Amino acid sequence: MLHWQDVRKSFASVRAVDGLSLSVNAGECLGLLGPNGAGKTTSLSIAVGLLVPDSGRVVLRHNGADHSPAEPAVRALIGVAPQALAIYDQLTGVENLRFFGALQGLTGRELTRRVAEVLDLVGLADRAAHRAAGYSGGMKRRLNLAAALLHKPPLLLLDEPTAGVDPQSRNAILRILADLRSAGHTIIYSTHYMEEAQRLCDRVAIIDKGRLLAVDHIPSLIAAHGGDSVVELLHARPRPGADSPVERITTSDPLETLRAALARDGRDPAAPQLVSARVAGPDLESVFLKLTGRTLRD
Amino acid sequence: MGIIWALLTKDLRLLVRDRAGFFFTFFFPLIFAVFFGTIFSSGGGPAPKLQVALAVADDSPAARRFAEALASADEFNLSRVNTVEEARALVLLRKAVAAVVIPPGYGAAREAVFSGPPAEVQVGVDPSRAAESGMLQGVLQKYAFVDLVASMRDPVVMRAQTAAARSALAASSSVDPATRLILTGLFTQLDAVAGRLGQPSSTRDQSATTNNGFTFQPVRFVTSEIRPLRAGPPNAYAVSFPQGIIWAVMGACMGFAVSLVSERTGGTLARLRVAPIARWKVLLGKAAGCFVTTTGVTGLLLGVSMLPPFGVRFAAPLTLAVAVACAGLGFTGLMMLIASIGRTERACSGVGWGVMMVFAMIGGATVPLFVMPEWMQRLSDISPMKWTVLAIEGGVWRGHSLAEIALPCIILVAIGLIGFLVGWKLFDREPTT
């Protein structure tokens, strides 16, 4: 549905996006995963026409034709929730949404109905008449998201929509987005929270320093780049020659490794009693670590 | 239109809910206008000096002496000009209360102070400033007699005057014998007094005349009216309210400029830009909010100025309406320019108010333009506030026609257009991070 085609963008000497080629298919949720400064926001800004790429282009395919997101009519297909809280603090929730709905061409009863619907969807109906200045961070985030949903856009571009919110609001937002994905919306979800990407996204694109490092379904990414599992054994006391009662074994076959460890201890009457065993499989964090040499939080 | 209306109402709602901004846009200018209008209405302090234009068309010592006496007078601010026309022009332009002209023949007439027709001084006065004109004539009389007394203290001058008078008396055939006897005796005594450096003991009534053409009137002031091209402000509020309007439109302009920067830094501008509408509509919506606010607050202040305590009556309502609209356009453009200056609200506010305050001070928002020294009036040409004040005063009390406010209005509209174009560039400008 949306395609970045060899897109490059620099700010002075900083290359923010470096040859990005990426596609998101209709109905899927694509995660853009990368640390702060990776180029996620710049990539999204180019996708909605806020920035002009130095080279390359972004194409939105709709009804069999290619369009530039810079075309006003095409922008009606996109709902954007910017990373910044793009709402007016001095207006109430309803006033904010009525204004943004009017910008999307909604009027009269349709505008009133859609405002009520999205307020209900994001759980702000009871605070709708209050000014946004009095909202909590999580409520503002939900209002920010609601403004992107008013015109029922088939494509949603969400730039870190859970940044700085409490776990309760984060869960609420992720639940809303899961429902939207189920309803057939195409979602591009930018985040540096690995667990959110794992929970919500069908595919994940890992971006760092403006470059696309990998993009695939999450199991495939983990299988390809996640590395070995870690089997963690907790003994009643340190094994002979060890300093800690916790024994960690890196392995590509955790089940066989566990079986072998149990057999080893069974043959040795002096071996300490095994208290617990845990297998930690590779995840997106380890994929990112493998691809970039650093963690997402670095 | 719906989009622009949505943008406009949103901005007005935000303005009203920003209490500080609302105060500085609506109430501060009103307080300013009423406060300064009241101060200037109540008078107090020393009376200002009379502005008088003087043209000397006679090259005699007496004319020069009288001109010097006037020049050194405390009651005047004398502007010496070369021609009668220049002196009259200053009155026409309201730059002088009166044009005083010492005509050819003044010196000869002063020599024959005790005989022949009195010396004439022509005084052209602005009839709308009757009190000042009356005061002026009194002061002129005073200096005429001072000059007379001075000449009588000068034995040479006095003996010349009495000699001239005696000759004239001898040559006259129409003087009756009794008068001739009295006057001959008088002139003889005056001559004797002059010879002894005697001093006169009393002044003379300028209207005093003797019969048969022998007069004793040192100077006759021939007054005429010179109607200025324009009437002055009817009261101090007619001046202070246009000044208050400047503060109001400045407040509105700065409020919208800062809000535009806030939209950019806060991210709402990005949301506007990704909306499925032409960008010029978004820009027009922002500009419309500023225009409606500036013209609205101007209309409000003008409405208040008409209320009984202030009693301002507009000399040219159509001119005023056009001036208000042009001022609104100009300040909307200024808003766009200022919004493009700063990348943050603080930078925009600091730079914007700094520039605006200087423009306001030299542009007539603090001190009325017409009382500024000439060099400052020239300097004020760079201030948009000057053109706004001129255009609005043109409608409020100057009674200007549309043609007469064309220049200020063209300048204001040009500022508006330039600002809009710069704002357009700003709107399309990419963030740098």
Image (spheres, coloured by chain):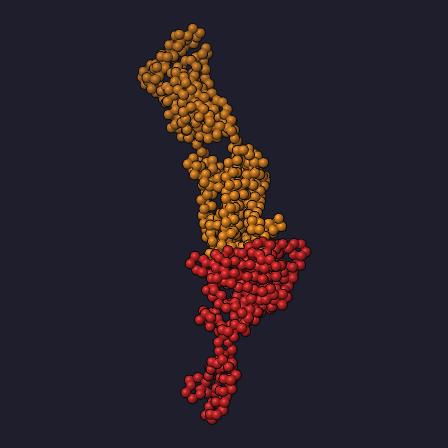
Chain colours: A red, B orange
Q: Position of residue A281 (x, y in %)?
A: 51, 78
Q: Between residues B109 and B44, which one lies in front from this camera angle? A: B109
Residue farthest to the front, as pictured: A64
Point out residue B12 in the picture as x, y percentages from the top left corner: 58, 50
**Residue A93 visible here:** no
Residue positioned 55% across, 53% down in the render: B18
Judge by depth and name the residue closer to the eye, B309 or A13.
Answer: A13
Left or right: B168, with A216 as reference point? left
Which residue lies at the image location 48% right of the left edge and 39% below the top edge? B386
* Location of residue A43 with respect to B223 vertically, above or below: below
In the rendered structure, the answer to whether residue A272 lies left or right of residue A90 reads left
| Residue B82 sits in quarter | top left
- Residue A154 occupies which quadrant of the picture? bottom right
Residue found at the very far left of the displayed protein:
B196
Above/below status of A47 relative to B333: below
Q: Is residue B338 visible?
A: yes
**Could you say where residue B392 lies in the image, as x and y percent from the top left?**
53, 38
- Residue at the location (55% across, 65% down)? A189
